[in-house]
Image: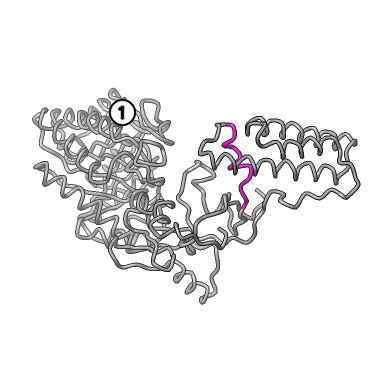
Amino acid sequence: MKNKSSPSWNLRNAEHYYGFKRWGANHFSVDDAGFLCAHPQGDHRSIRLTDIIAEAKEKGLRAPLVIRLQDLLRKRVVQLNEAFIKAVEEEGYAGRYRGVFPVKVNQMREVVDEILDAGKPYQYGLEAGSKPELAIAMAQLDRKGPLLICNGYKDEEYIRLALMGNKLGKTVIIVIEQLSEVETIIRLAKETGVDPIIGVRVKLRAGGEGKWASSTGEDAKFGLTAGEILTVTNTLKDEGFEKSLQLVHFHIGSQVPNILTIKKAVVEATRFYCELAKMGFPMKYIDVGGGLGVDYDGSRTNYESSMNYSLEEYARDVVANVKMECDKAGVEAPDIVSESGRAIVAPHSVLVLEVVDRITKPNQPIKIPEGEAPHAIVSDLLEILRNKDRLSGLERFHDAQQRKEEAQSLFTLGYLDLRTRALAESVCWEICRDIKKIAAKKGYMPDELEQLEYMLAEQYVCNFSVFQSLLDHWALDQLFPVAPLHRLKERPSVEAILVDITCD
């Protein structure tokens, strides 16, 4: 961003341009001096992010830094639980909400501690998807009441540890996701003398949506078909464990952008719950899994980096649809469990990068020694540069690209020297800048010329590694909002692409 201010540019423009009001959910704003501020509680109290960075530097730290807003984390836990409590009251729902946080989403102790502390009034629990996560959850849940949901692949050690949790007085629910787990659970329950609490994960006909859609539906690797669920129920009855089955679980993927997808899944899963209840099993819980999205781009659409619903709408639709299906079936309403992870932790962390250098397209003055006749290709490019009125922008772009490619080919074949090639490329970039400037004034740019924005953009070299700092971006092409931390009173004047310092 160049150091230029504009009388027509103000803080409201900055907030709109960078989308703080759209994706920030009242947690980010610009102060009167043009600094980006965080509002962890979503109220008038604010913190300049540059002040946090200055304090970190005094302690010997330097960018890249991840700033975690612990109060914002606490706020998200409260918002989620209060949204469901309100939905339960408005719908006259007989059950209650029993949320759990998936440990795999963020295993940092300070994060899990903050979430559990904020969730104490709501008996907010944890979800484990592996043996190490279960060990973490067992240690962190130091009180009775909150649920501990056990998902993922389960060997004997995993199941034995879960049963020990029940023996210690914790409410540990083992979710059967593969038929092979049933026999092991029953055998170890008899061996340890522990009555297990069991759930079944169902494979829904309703598929997910977004980046993780392929992990859901009838072809998902985890979950039981209708026939397999009947096999499980018959086995539990035959072995005298029919009182253990208490939960139905499903998962339709992370970051579900469309509320209709969630509604369909909830209705279908509730039908499974109702059928099991009518078969005589003491059903208590329905676990709607994860999927609650984050509006990364602020568009409020069903695009994969957004969501076309609010947290409150999500809670109301889950509660209302479970209630509707239970009422139709004449079944007592269960406690509703959700495993929202991304929606809890994603907004609370900010990655801070330091720009260390910039790379620009050639922009040197075009100098041809006096008395020297330029090469024919250079002459043609100079003519294209001057013919602003006779040729359209698209035609000038096509002609310039053609001459540039000819110059590069001739250089490779040895028919053009280095100075002439450099001059040809310099004129070509000047033509592109001129075309872009004229098109911007006209207010219309053909689709093919829109690539000029990318071609002419500067590259800001930042001190970080995408592979280490933004795993979701390079692995999953996850979109994240980006904004400067200061000088927001100035009108942006440079199109830039952020690149890291690694050679990869």
Front residue of 36 and 99:
36
Residue 228 sits in which quadrant? top left
Residue at 41% from the left image edge and 41% from the top image edge: 305
Q: Is residue 131 left or right of residue 4?
A: left
Front residue of 418 and 125:
418
Secondary structure mostly seen in the magenta stretch: helix
Magenta span: 448-459
Residue at 34% from the left image edge and 31% from the top image edge: 179
Front residue of 428 and 126:
428
In the rendered view, tell whether residue 257 sits above or below residue 63.
Answer: above
Q: Is residue 59 left or right of residue 299?
A: right
In the rendered view, tell whether residue 434 sits above or below residue 81.
Answer: above
Residue 320 sits in which quadrant? top left
Residue labelled with disc 1: 204
Residue 150: x and y in percent read 32, 45
The image's colouring method is one colour
Q: Amino acid at mark 1?
A: Leu
